[in-house]
Image (tube, rainbow, N blue to C red):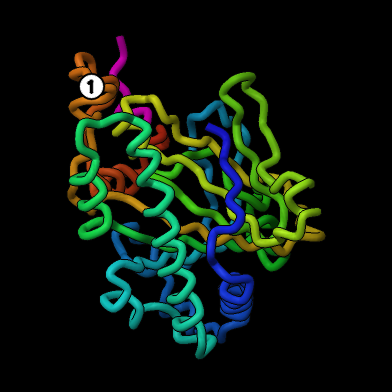
Amino acid sequence: MLPRHVINHGISDETIRDAVDANRRFEEAPPEVKEALKSGDVYQPVRFGTVLDSRGGHGSGCGTFVRDFLKLYSFPLEDWIEFWPSYPPDYRSKMGKYSKETRNLSISLLKPMLESLHITDPSPLLHKVTSEGMHMMAVNHYHTGLQQQLLSNSAAQIGIPPHTDHTLITVLLQTSPGLHVLDPTDGNWKDAAAPSEIIQGGAQNTLQVLVGDQLEVLSNGRYRGAVHRVSQCSPDNCSRISVASLLSFGMDEVVEPAAEMDGDELLKPFYKGRSLRDLLDHLASGEKLPFIETLRIMG
């Protein structure tokens, strides 16, 4: 599915500006601050790194990409915020506020999406998400300082290869255009920047909403995960930040097609049930096949 643009979402311009500002200044943190957060362990709840990414699948075949990333577990916020970056000094307060508000927005958007599936009673599913679900912030920074990584791998480019998020939904803030989404109707890549008429209307802080793997599985394919990439950052002129708010079921909650939709029993599930921890195991294994491809039942 192509992303949807959300305006009038209730998150103030100041809160959005503060989140971007905090992450721009984090990039200027002393080396020891970043070094303390560096980890290649996908199970770590808070970690920073520069990654060369060459995921397979999704018809990519387009080489290797490099970016800086920062992953932050964020729910319950009080359990994780003390492990977040301590530089700049207001990072935790600014990103903490943005995290809370985007989580609330995500839940408000998810409710009608579940209702649209006409599940007999979607309230238990929504309760699991709101009380036990995972929420994570993922910050990607595409910038000219990655030049050294490009020199060490001549095939690399600044960006991120085609992929889907293993979420229910992702709410994305991007500081400049760069996100492209694969249109399933014609197989072409489309620019996911906000439509010009929205920008001209004064809504500069438009957010994008992308469907993730968990909602695809839960809906038995009625919603499809958005295949997206970033691949047009020039090493000579690139300073782009994206902040993704990732809403999912709990770490060990097995997500499978809902038992009933449209009042009828689900006779043929098209996906296997798996959890978020299964995804981490998949990533840790080094397997290049997209996780969603391992869940689809063929035939």
Q: For the point 40% across and 53% down, which residue is it?
A: 108
Q: Which residues are magenta?
A: 292-299
Q: Which residue is nearer to you in this view: 65 or 294?
A: 294
- Left or right of residue 85, residue 229 in this image: right
Extreme residue toward the top, this view: 299
**135 and 86: which one is in front?**
135
Mark 1 Cα shell of 10 Å, populated few (<14), some (14-19), many (≥20): few
77 in relation to 61, above or below: below
Asked if residue 154 is positioned above or below residue 40 in the image, the reply reads above
Q: Residue at 29% of width from left, 33% of height from top?
A: 218
> Residue 202: percent from the left, percent from the top?
76, 60
Coordinates of residue 61 in the picture (x, y in percent)? 59, 30
Q: Please indicate, yes or no, whether residue 167 appears anywhere in the rendered image.
A: no
Q: Residue at x 50, y 57 (%)?
A: 244
Quadrant placement of the C terminus: top left
On whether residue 113 falls in the magenta region, the answer is no
In the picture of the structure, the residue carrying the numbered disc 1 is 263
Q: Nearer the viewer, residue 87 or 117?
A: 117
- Disc 1 residue type (three-letter): Gly
Locate residue 295: give its quadrant: top left
Element under label 1?
loop
The quadrant holding residue 143 is: bottom right
Residue at the image position 37 percent from the left and 69 percent from the top: 46
Q: From the viewer's perspective, tell me whether residue 252 is left or right of residue 227.
A: left
Residue 249: x, y in percent? Answer: 27, 49
Q: Which residue ends up furthest to the bottom in the rendered image?
A: 89
Judge whether residue 185 can be spotted in this image.
yes
Q: Is residue 26 above or below residue 2?
A: below
